[in-house]
Image: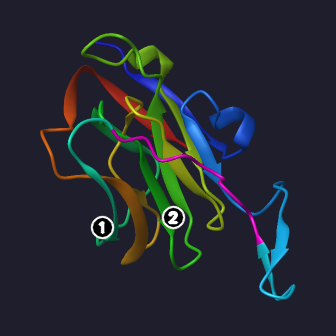
C-alpha cells in the first residue's frame, strides 16, 4: 500500500478558496467605526447553517502538540453548517482539507495542507472535508463558530491507505 504524501503550503485566501475563507485583516478592506478608533474588517466569512439549529461560539483548547511529518488516518465534514477556527493567542496551526464532494467520502488524492501564520483563521464551508484541529503549540485556544443543536452534523471517513503530511 503506497503512502500519499501531502506538502504543507502557506495559507493564502486564493489557495484556500475551494475550501472556505481565510479570516485575516491582511489583504482585506476595512472601514472606520467608533469615531475612527476601530478598523472594521467586515464579513470576512459567512456562517452556513441548515436545519433546526443556531450559530454558536465556543472555545476549543487543543492540549496536544502536533509535529511534522504527521500521519493522518481520517477526515471529517459538517454537511449542515460551516465551521470557523480563529486562533486566540497568535499561534500557528495546521489545516488539512479536501474538497466537498457529492459523496460520502473525500478524494484522498485531493488533500491539501496549509499553515496559518497565527494571525489567520479559517472558515470551512459546509461539507468541506477537514482534519480536526492540529496545533504546533499547546495548549492553544481557538474561538470556534459553528452550528450547534439540532440533528447530527459530523461525518467521519477513515482512510484505507496512509496519508502523510510533511513540511
Instruction: Say which label, 2 or 1, has the lower sequence index.
Output: 1
Vertical position of residue 89 compared to residue 125: above or below: below
Question: Marks 1 and 2: in contact by CB < 8 Å?
Answer: no
**On screen, 10 above or below 130?**
below
Q: Which mark is residue 145?
A: none
Q: Quadrant of residue 17?
A: top right
Residue highlighted by disc 1:
64
Q: Quadrant of the N terminus?
A: top left
Residue at horizontal 53 percent and vertical 38 percent from the top: 113
Secondary structure of the residue carrying numbered label 2: strand
Residue 102 % position (x, y): 35, 10
- Closer mark to the observer between disc 2 and disc 1: 2
Q: CA distance from mark 2 to mark 1?
A: 17 Å
In the displayed structure, 83 sits above or below 161; it is: below
66 magenta-colored: no
Q: Does the magenta stretch mainly form a helix, a strand or a loop?
A: loop
Question: From what the image shows, is residue 148 above or below residue 156?
Answer: below
- Check residue 43 for magenta coloring: yes
Q: Residue 42, position in %: x, y?
A: 71, 60
Tell me if 103 is positioned left or right of 25 in this view.
left
Q: Position of residue 145 (x, y in %)?
A: 40, 59
Q: Image point 40% across, 33% down: which residue?
A: 126
Q: Which residue is mark 2?
A: 86
Total numbered badges shown on the rendered structure: 2
Q: Residue 153 is drawn in which quadrant?
A: top left
Q: Quadrant of the C terminus?
A: top right
Q: Which residues are magenta?
A: 40-49
Amino acid at each position: 500500500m503506497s503512502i500519499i504524501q501531502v506538502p504543507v503550503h502557506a495559507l493564502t485566501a486564493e489557495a484556500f478558496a475551494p475550501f472556505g475563507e481565510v479570516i485575516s485583516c491582511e489583504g482585506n478592506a476595512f472601514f472606520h467605526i467608533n469615531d475612527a478608533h476601530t478598523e472594521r474588517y467586515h464579513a470576512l466569512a459567512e456562517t452556513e447553517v441548515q436545519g433546526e439549529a443556531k450559530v454558536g461560539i465556543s472555545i476549543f483548547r487543543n492540549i496536544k502538540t502536533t509535529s511534522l511529518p504527521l500521519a493522518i488516518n481520517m477526515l471529517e465534514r459538517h454537511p449542515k453548517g460551516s465551521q470557523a477556527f480563529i486562533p486566540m493567542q497568535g499561534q500557528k496551526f495546521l489545516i488539512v482539507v479536501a474538497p466537498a464532494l457529492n459523496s460520502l467520502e473525500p478524494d484522498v488524492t485531493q488533500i491539501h495542507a496549509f499553515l496559518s501564520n497565527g494571525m489567520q483563521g479559517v472558515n470551512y464551508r459546509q461539507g468541506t472535508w477537514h482534519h480536526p484541529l492540529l496545533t504546533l503549540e499547546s495548549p492553544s485556544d481557538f474561538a470556534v463558530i459553528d452550528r450547534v443543536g439540532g440533528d447530527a452534523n459530523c461525518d467521519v471517513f477513515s482512510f484505507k491507505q496512509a496519508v502523510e503530511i510533511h513540511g
